[in-house]
Amino acid sequence: MADTIQQTETTGSLVTQWALAPTDGASLAVFRVVLGLTVAAYAVKALLLGEVRGIYVDAPHHFSYYGFSWVKPWPSGGMYLHFFALAMSGVLVAAGILYRVSSVLMAVLFTFVFLCDRTAYLNHMYLICLLSWMIVVVPAHAVWSMDRFGHTDKSPSTVPTWSVWLVRFHVALPYFFGGLAKLNSDWLHGQPMRMTLSQQEWFGAVGQHGNPEWIVQIFSFGGIFFDLAIVPALLLARVRAIAFVVAMAFHFTNAFVFPIGVFPWLMIAATSVFFASDWPRRAAARVGLRAAGIINTAPTETCLEADTATPSFRQNPGLSLLAAYVVFQCIVPLRHLALPGNVSWTERGHFFAWHMMLRGKRCGLRIYATDRETGMTTPVDLRHFVTAYQLPKVGRDPEHIRQLAHKIATTLDPANPKRFEIRALALVSLNGRMAELLVDPSVNLAAMPATWTHPKWILKSQQLLPKQHWNVPLLEWETALGLNVEELLNVQTLPKDKAAKVSVPPGQKHVRIQKPQGPSIEG
């Protein structure tokens, strides 16, 4: 027993010595510049293209993440100033000016934007959010920053090894878990890629001259192989250069085929962190920047021998916290495995899990409000509650529908929101399947609380993957499915246990329903 404890402590000490050993900070400096400029470019683009107004200013309602309903966009012109400050903080981080202050400022400002509206979630936005907080804790300003410009002291240009590996870990997250998520039936059958590529003009042109199914298979299985193999390949020095070229080709293809914003360019630059930490110095020396005096390409200071009194892993609280954080980031993407149902259908566990391009959803949504005082049920004009940007994001996600129901009930009678029962007729076609009900239309969603688990009002998908896409036009869905909206929403026809869920008022004899002419959502 004592030998086991001593061996564990020795291993922990070796890990700590390795993690704290100094290494060249040049690659970390390049990453700092790339991340800062990426954030600045994102903020400027959002200002110039009207995204700030369309997503954060004009929207009458914003959807929140679990536990963050208190985060709301600034009123009036506050969001414009916020994005301007975000752009400036990105430039300051890239230049390494007041780094400790500017890095925290950038992380706070970007996280605020990220949390403002759940319908704006994108995997690369989440990645930038994580990276922004990561550079707060790593000394990415140790090399080639304005904070060090003109210093006459001998402050080290090295960084601890753990800081470089923390960047590598974050870059590996979307690769590995993105590949792991693709190991599902729909992806292996090529359905998500088949639907996505069918919207490309060039794919249709190929189809005129032959069967383009081979392209679907290349994208599908090539995507799995690339995501799962690229990180191990980048860790092997012998094939690292080849792997980087393959990664560049992969991201260039994504950039020109799929509309995924800055993600491909960020990943190309960030993937370079897998090279030796002094690669920027060697690259600069090769192109003659050293001779021109533009950049210092001299090797970094000689690393000192590790102190024999280096604290053990358990005695170093910083490394222990980092280890816990790494474990947490490895568990979060897998949380959907503990929840029932297909995550692409229920959306429970979809966020923060690096699920990319796994599901294509066509959605039809109509919201009904029942006045408990009069018994009148009418469809709600959704244009008063959501924007064109939010429309396709709401109908496919049960949580967004629940939040919308709460907003509608509160708006219809702010003094007594419980006066109205809000139900949803939400029809969704997943990856070309026949459309089916996403949520229970008999449930008063305005009475449903927020939860991170799987609520019973989210219905299970019953449809199998079809051989051909279900291409029925949205306006014909109710007829094609044989739905009777009055029967679905008439609480008097429900069993007693379900009637109790919607709190049917005493004496209510009949639910009067207007013909379903209200606006719908398709996404």
Image (cartoon, rainbow, N blue to C red):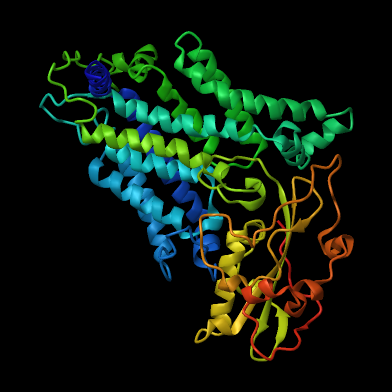
Q: Position of residue 72 (x, y in %)?
A: 43, 65
Could you tell whether 164 is left or right of 459 in the image? left
Position above or below: 63 against 354 = below
Position above or below: 435 against 414 = above
The extreme left residue here reads 153
The quarter of the picture where the C terminus appears is bottom right
Residue drawn at (16%, 15%) of the image = 304
Q: Nearer the viewer, residue 77 or 196?
A: 196
Could you tell whether 493 is left or right of 43 in the image? right
Q: Position of residue 483 (x, y in %)?
A: 84, 66
Q: Position of residue 427 (x, y in %)?
A: 75, 60
Position above or below: 94 against 226 = below
Q: Position of residue 176 (x, y in %)?
A: 53, 29
Q: Is residue 98 visible?
A: no
Position above or below: 249 against 98 = above
Residue 305, quarter of the rendered image: top left
Q: Nearer the viewer, residue 443 or 384?
A: 443
User: How many marks overall?
Assistant: 0
Q: Nearer the viewer, residue 132 or 147?
A: 132
Could you tell whether 238 is left or right of 165 in the image? right
Residue drawn at (76%, 77%) of the image = 490
The extreme front residue here reads 1
The extreme top residue here reads 238
The quarter of the picture where the N terminus appears is top left
Q: Is residue 497 visible?
A: yes
Residue drawn at (27%, 23%) of the image = 19
Q: Nearer the viewer, residue 359 or 437?
A: 437
Could you tell whether 267 is left or right of 473 in the image? left
